[in-house]
Image: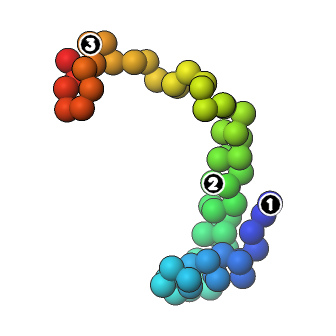
Amino acid sequence: MDLDPEHVRLLLMQQGYAVPDEDLLEITASLNALVEGMADLSRFGPLQEEPWPILVDYLGEQHAG
């Protein structure tokens, strides 16, 4: 699903942003790349192992051993 510049303009206007036309194409391309990258993350299930190692002796809350 690719967003076109007018969809992006509408989304930004709903959030209170007014974007100049010369910046809209770059923002649209960046947003489409972000959406595409996040769609690739769907291959990881909710029980998938974390992509970083677990901290040794981590006790939770404010303690990081």
> Of discs 1 and 2, which sits in the foreground?
1
Residue type indicated by callout 1: Met
Q: Position of residue 4 (x, y in %)?
A: 76, 74
Q: CA distance from mark 2 to mark 3?
A: 35 Å
Element type at marker 3?
Answer: loop
Q: Position of residue 12 (x, y in %)?
A: 56, 79
Lateral position of residue 33 relative to residue 49, left or right: right
Name above or below for residue 48 compared with residue 4. Answer: above
| In contact (CB < 8 Å): disc 2 and disc 3 | no
Query: Which of the image's four quarters has the N terminus?
Result: bottom right
Name above or below for residue 39 compared with residue 7. Answer: above
Q: Earlier in the sequence, mark 1 or mark 2?
A: 1
Element type at marker 2?
Answer: helix
Circle 3 residue: 57
Name above or below for residue 10 compared with residue 57. Answer: below
Residue type indicated by callout 3: Asp
Q: Residues within 10 Å of mark 2 (few under 14, many from 20)?
A: few
In the depicted view, which residue is nearer to us: 33 or 1?
A: 1
Q: Position of residue 57 (x, y in %)?
A: 26, 13
Q: Residues within 10 Å of mark 3 (few under 14, many from 20)?
A: few
The extreme top residue here reads 56
- The residue sitting at 69% across, 60% down in the picture is 32
On residue 1, the disc is 1
Circle 2 residue: 34
Q: CA distance from mark 1 to mark 2?
A: 12 Å
Element type at marker 1?
Answer: loop
